[in-house]
């Protein structure tokens, strides 16, 4: 009599169970880093801003909706203040092409002469101090025909800490800059409650966070505030370059340093999207605005005037959004004519 082959149902069930365990483990491994990222993002100081109060002009640029525009504010703060009672030391427009992920960085010179609602004509960097992010964004939009609804604000210590977490940034220091970089770095170190090594000679350097922040603040060389804005963009580019090449542990350390020192209107979802997509973005343009400018003294203040505001805005829209022959709004035309008649 042939013996019946015994079945092993337990073996089949165990194999199935192993697959379930493997899938569960894989999901866990995916969720753990996401959980850490979400936790870190939750440490950001978020600002629930009523975006309906942010003003815009009536303009006609069919291409602007294809871009995400965010203003990066660097605050001239000595007490870790990220709220409205402080002037902005740097103002950078990050314009992101939603399709190609190409990014343009435009430094709007902080002394640019603009109209601020209820305060008249004055320097652009006063807007944040007068009325916080809402007034600052409205001022940018109303003077330049933009549609910015979100901002990210950081201070000096955040910049220093991020650069240190990345292992420094490589910057070429000129002979003219050397003295000032050391002087400003010493000042930053004092503010941050730390120490800094003196840079002994010009040339390509790997700068620490404090040294790089000092470099960003130098304005007493040829070009004044214009070259300072260029230095700020250079450091920002180097930070992005180092972040793209960093390993996960370094990136985690960077997040641990910067996120608690960030003040922003972006939602957790927005920040998570930008953070996870960092390797998709590429900085393709880096320049200052206005393009054609003068530095007159108006009402006793040294300011930067666009020559003219209207023509500069037209050129900027062409560069930012590939909008040929952009015709500025009637509001920009009016402000442009008024500014030209003031000096």
Image (cartoon, rainbow, N blue to C red):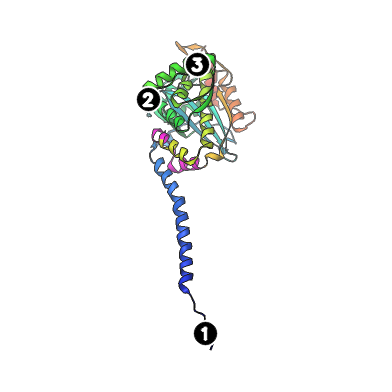
- Rounded to the nearest angstrom, the CA distance separating label 3 from label 2 is 21 Å
The image quarter in which residue 67 lies: top right
Of 196 and 293, which appears nearest the observer?
Answer: 196
- Write down the residue under mark 3: 178
Of 177 and 290, which appears nearest the observer?
Answer: 177
Q: Is residue 265 above or below residue 309?
A: below
In the image, residue 306 lies at what x, y percent?
55, 19
Let me know if residue 108 appears in the view: no
- Write down the residue under mark 2: 192
In the image, residue 216 lies at what x, y percent?
48, 22
Q: Residue at x 37, y 25 (%)?
A: 192
- Sequence order check, earlier mark of 3 and 2: 3
Q: Given this view, does label 1 or label 3 mark the residue nearer the observer? A: 1
- Rounded to the nearest angstrom, the CA distance separating label 2 from label 1 is 84 Å
Of helix, strand and loop, which one carries label 3? helix
Question: Are the residues at dot 2 and dot 1 in contact (C-beta closer than 8 Å)?
Answer: no
Specify start and end residues of the magenta stretch as a single range: 257-276
Q: Is residue 166 above or below residue 108?
A: below
Q: What's the mark number on residue 3?
A: 1
Of 259 and 3, which appears nearest the observer?
Answer: 3
Of 175 and 132, which appears nearest the observer?
Answer: 175
């Amino acid at each position: 009599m042939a013996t019946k082959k015994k079945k092993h149902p337990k073996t089949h069930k165990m194999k199935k169970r192993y697959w379930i365990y493997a899938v569960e483990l894989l999901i866990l491994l995916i969720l753990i880093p996401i959980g850490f990222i979400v936790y870190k993002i939750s440490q950001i100081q978020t600002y629930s801003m009523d975006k309906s109060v942010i003003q815009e002009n009536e303009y006609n640029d069919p291409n602007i909706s294809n871009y995400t525009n965010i203003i990066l504010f660097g605050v001239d703060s000595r007490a870790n203040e990220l709220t409205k009672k402080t002037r902005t030391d740097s103002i950078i427009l990050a314009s992101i092409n939603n399709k190609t992920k190409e990014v343009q960085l435009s430094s709007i010179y902080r002394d640019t002469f603009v109209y601020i609602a209820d305060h008249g004509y004055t320097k652009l960097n006063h807007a944040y101090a007068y009325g916080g992010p809402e007034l600052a964004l409205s001022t940018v939009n109303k003077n330049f025909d933009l549609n910015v609804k979100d901002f990210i604000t950081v201070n000096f210590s955040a910049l220093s800490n991020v650069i240190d977490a990345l292992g420094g940034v490589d910057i070429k220091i000129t002979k003219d800059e050397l003295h000032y970089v050391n002087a400003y770095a010493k000042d930053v170190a004092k503010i941050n409650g730390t120490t800094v090594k003196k840079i002994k000679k010009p040339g390509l350097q790997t700068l620490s966070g404090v040294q790089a922040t000092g470099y960003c603040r130098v304005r007493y060389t040829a070009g004044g505030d214009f070259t300072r804005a260029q230095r700020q963009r250079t450091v920002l580019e180097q930070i992005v370059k180092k972040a793209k090449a960093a390993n996960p542990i370094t990136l985690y350390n960077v997040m641990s340093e910067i996120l608690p020192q960030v003040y922003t209107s972006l939602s957790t979802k927005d920040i998570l999207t930008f953070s996870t997509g960092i390797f998709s973005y590429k900085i393709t343009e880096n320049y200052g605005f206005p393009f054609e400018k003068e530095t007159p003294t108006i009402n006793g203040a040294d300011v930067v005037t666009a020559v003219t505001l209207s023509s500069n805005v037209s050129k900027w829209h062409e560069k930012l959004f590939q909008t040929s022959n952009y015709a500025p709004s009637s509001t920009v035309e009016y402000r442009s004519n008024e500014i030209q008649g003031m000096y």
